[in-house]
Image (cartoon, grey):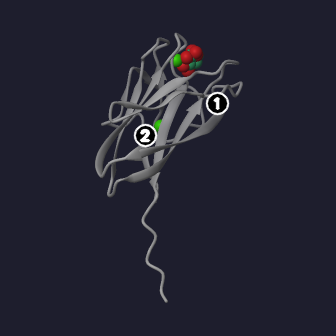
Amino acid sequence: AAIRQEVETAPATCDGAIESNHTGYSGSGFCNGRNAVGAAAQFTVNVSAAGTATIAVRYANGTTDNRPADVLVNGSVAQAASTFDPAGAWTTWATKTLTASLTAGSNTIRLSPTTAAGLANIDYVEVETTGTPPPSET
Ligand code: GCU
Ligand code: CA
Ligand code: CA
């Protein structure tokens, strides 16, 4: 099952403010990052086994411009300048899906914007690990 980590809930961090003025978010709010390069949101997720994970980032971008961000897993860039495409309204929430390798136990997932516009507004991440398939019965 997917693990959801809300950005407004510790141990997640938001270099900016947790806000709730644009409806449609999950939980109690979203991260409005400072509009600056490197003003990041970071999540910590625990997975039981190492492997490839699907990381779904829920975000809103009410501008007409992409808000790219490097995705760092445990401090290393897993995906550079991942796109967070515009949707025209801050109340329109979208999902960006990434894949990355995670280690067993605690992992950090950091979204670090690469332009002065900063991050899109970030709601949560959902992490799904690809489990080892059960042995087939013969
Ligand atoms: C507006 C909007 C914020 C958003 C900001 C931005 O101020 O209300 O939620 O974060 O634009 O451009 O980053
Ligand atoms: Ca912002
Ligand atoms: Ca949220």
Comparing labels 2 and 1, the label whose residue is closer to the camera: 2
Task: Give the residue type at disc 2.
Answer: Glu
Is the shortest distance between ligand 3 and the CB of mark 2 under 8 Å? yes
Picture residue at 39% right of the left edge, 20% below the top: 15
Q: Which residue reaches farthest bottom?
A: 138
Against 44, is 134 above or below? below
Query: What residue is shown with label 1?
Result: 91
Residue 56 at x, y percent in the picture: 53, 43
Residue 5 location, quadrant: top left
Name the mark on residue 5. none
Residue 119 at x, y percent in the picture: 51, 22
Against 28, is 2 above or below? below
Name the mark on residue 6. 2
The CA span between labels 2 and 1 is 17 Å
Picture residue at 58% right of the left edge, 21% below the top: 67
Task: Give the residue type at disc 1.
Answer: Thr
Mark 2 vs mark 1: which is more N-terminal? Answer: 2
- Circles 2 and 1, Cβ within 8 Å, touching? The answer is no
